Amino acid sequence: MTGSRLRPPLKNAYLFIGEEVFLIEEELSHARNLLGDGASMNSSSWQAPEVYRMDEVIGLCNTMPFLSDRRLVVVRNAHKLPAADQEKINGYLGDPCPSTTLILTMESVKDKDEAKVTKWLTSPHETVHFNALKGRDAIEWIAGRAQALGKTIDRVAANRLAEATAGNVWFMASEIDKLSLYTSDNPAISLKDVEELVMRSLEPPVFSFLDSLFDRRKDVITKLCELEWTGMTELEIISRIEKNITQHYQVLVENKKNLPGLSAYGEKKISGRRSLWSASQLVELLGEIRKVEHGIKSGKSLHPYAEMHDAILSVLSPA
């Protein structure tokens, strides 16, 4: 997903659904831009569940646009509307105004929950998914974003940027914009540019937490608590910890070099922790973290963050 999804002429109804709120925001902005000069007078937005009078929304949908070919109406988080209002939307979409585009959004919805939150929406519409960007999708999105700014970025640099930002699209977009300015007249963004600018300036909470953990700093639990406010799930955090444990074991114990996905900067940083971690300690930490992971996946974990606290402290501060 490297560009806008909507193309003129706009259809009567769309559902924007997925975890990536940033991408939904960008596509809504693109939809408004497609209205041209009449956008300010012919675009309206409501946020559920604060839509108090759905009849007014439907009435606006049935109103002809002013000095424009099309009207845009957005109802955000439509899955949070009362059932009566959802039924009114279904009724309208059964016979929509031909000059109106109604966009319903369902934000921060995971794939596994889609069927449940959309079962009420039975009238004709086009669904556009905005799923979390991972792996190749994240790298391609970064390349597309750079290209839109007149830049190129090689795959290694894009992968490093995706890794550094933990797949957070808002962070990725912000850092690509900075890199575009940083590289000035140079048309290419290199791994060196990412290392010099992003790794020094971004320091997202998950990165700060991992540094604190593997540097065995006293603020590690504080850093873990801060992650609760970032939107990262417990399993995402555990996945990052496990990946870093594996990398530390390969570098510190097996003395491996040039590992896939690990930059020269990252390898040097891990090597500097040789006196902090033994093979048995890394294996112990991995075992404790996997116990927490098993508890979450089996549904037996009641307080995952508290259990991660205990798992980390049991290794860093053994009784």
Image (tube, rainbow, N blue to C red):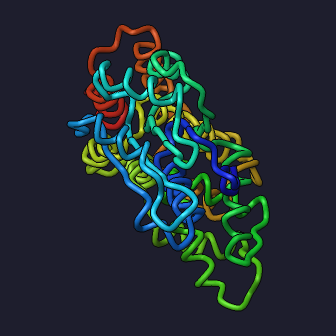
Q: Position of residue 255 (x, y in %)?
A: 71, 47
Q: Is residue 278 above or below residue 284?
A: below
In the image as oriented, which residue stretches furthest toward the bottom? 185
Q: Is residue 113 above or below residue 152?
A: above
Tell whether 123 sits left or right of 56. right
Tell whether 209 sits left or right of 195. left
- Which residue occupies the foreground of this view, 221 or 280? 221
Q: Is residue 233 above or below residue 297?
A: below
Q: Is residue 272 visible?
A: no
Number of labelled discs?
0
Q: Quadrant of the C terminus?
A: top left
Q: Position of residue 257 (x, y in %)?
A: 75, 52
- Which residue occupies the foreground of this view, 193 or 185? 185
Q: Is residue 176 above or below residue 269?
A: below
Tell whether 38 sits left or right of 309. right
Q: Residue at x 27, y 42 (%)?
A: 225
Q: Position of residue 301 (x, y in %)?
A: 33, 14
Q: Residue at x 59, y 69 (%)?
A: 176
Q: Residue at x 67, y 75 (%)?
A: 149
- Which residue occupies the foreground of this view, 224 or 244? 224
Q: Is residue 185 visible?
A: yes
